[in-house]
Image (spheres, rainbow, N blue to C red):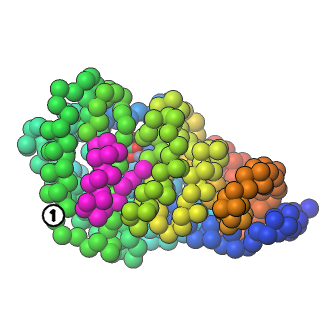
Amino acid sequence: MTVKERYEEARKEYEKLGIDVEGAMERTASIPLSMHCWQGDDVVGFDQKGPLSGGIQTTGNYPYRARNDEELFRDIEKTLSYVPGKHHKLNLHASYAIFEDGEWVDRNKIEPRHFKKWVDLAKKNHLGLDFNSTNFSHPLAENGTLSSENEEVRRFWIEHNIRCLKIAEYFAEETGEPCLLNIWIPDGLKDLPADRRAPRERLKDSLDRILAVPYDRSKVYVSVESKVFGIGMESYTVGSHEFYMNYAAKNNILCLIDTGHFHPTEIVADKLSSMLLFNDKLALHVSRPVRWDSDHVVLFNDDLRELAEEIVKNGPEHFFIGMDYFDASINRISAWTNGMRNMEKALLYAELEPNRELAQLQNGRNFTKIMSLREEIKTLPFGDIWNYYCEKDGVPAEHDWFADCEQYEEKVLSARV
Ligand code: RNT
Ligand code: ZN
């Protein structure tokens, strides 16, 4: 049987449950995913040669990391050729500024022109762009950034973030699409803080000063990303969830929820509907924590399906979905692809659930049927729908992309020595 024939059969099974399969595929295809550029080079970036710092860590020594913009662009295009969906975005970090002709400027001096090549890449591939200021992996980030007690250091990072606002505006203008500028800082303490309040007061003041610079709010959305702890910052994080949730609400900006930044027993998917009752938009970093914020590749697991369900039920148009994982122990193109495809897969899976019927059953307190219906869905021929969804988009089916990826490693990546 061809992929299409299998799909037709599978569709009948879903239709028995009253599910509109074509509609589900169409809706899924219109949800943009923002692919993070940093899986391709282990979050190294182009503006410095030092180690990754700020309480985050890539682990593994798989060869063939992209070492410059040319290699990274090529790997990005390869990865995107394996990802279905009509319209995606690229998520950049400020540390990926591209300097030419021996030029180099520090992070408080970066300009839109340092990202022109990224804009060209985005246009060529019909991608939107999102942005992140890089408040880590820098000599001035060792003892705090936007919350630093050193006024000069704090000013440096305020300037950096203001520069990033300008660059985000440039991205939105060039691509014709809104750009999310996300701010995450690693500031925190290894051991019990003597003063929890003052660093937070300084962070609040720094954000106020950044946001006091006028920018076009219809083009640029600013988000703030909280975290529960980082390596070497186990006891105290300045930018906690409560801090940013209140800051965002008061200043009409967005919260960014990274699925790896909460206590392991918290159900992150449960947070989405609460957040969206108080703000029209919510930003996400989709990651997979294993015992800690380990940034493992996103898998098609229960957590992801639950997250996707909440995205679909709350309306995907309310979300900025960014991916955030980095694995240096396996082929990076494959890591990237699996995470991206799994997010797409989870969204399609969620669109294929009888969500309205399930909600009605809950209203009727028919929990018996809810359980049975949900279990029934689990063994429907989802794989046949997914493979057709890929084929329709001219993207290889599940088995085939990996074979191509192996070829790419053999022909292209292995030359990087
Ligand atoms: C770190 C945050 C942050 C980074 C990226 C590289 O814990 O999740 O989002 O992963 O900005
Ligand atoms: Zn993140």
Residue at 11% x, 37% y: name it. Answer: 149
**Quarter residue 385 falls in:** bottom right
**Which residue in the protein does label 1 denote?**
212
Side (left or right) of 193 relative to 17: left
Region of the chain picked out in magenta, as a range? 239-257
Magenta-drawn stretch contains 242: yes
Residue at 30% x, 59% y: name it. Answer: 249
Name the residue nearer the viewer: 220 or 240: 240
**Quarter residue 171 falls in:** bottom left
- Residue 291, compared with residue 300, is above or below; it is above
Furthest-right residue in view? 1
Side (left or right) of 78 relative to 219: right
Identify the element where label 1 is drawn: loop
Furthest-left residue in view? 151
Q: Is residue 270 visible?
A: yes
Where the N terminus falls, by quadrant? bottom right
Furthest-top residue in view? 191
x, y percent for residue 80: 57, 59
Q: Is residue 105 visible?
A: no
x, y percent for residue 150: 9, 38
Residue type at mark 1? Ala
Side (left or right) of 390 relative to 161: right
x, y percent for residue 396: 71, 59
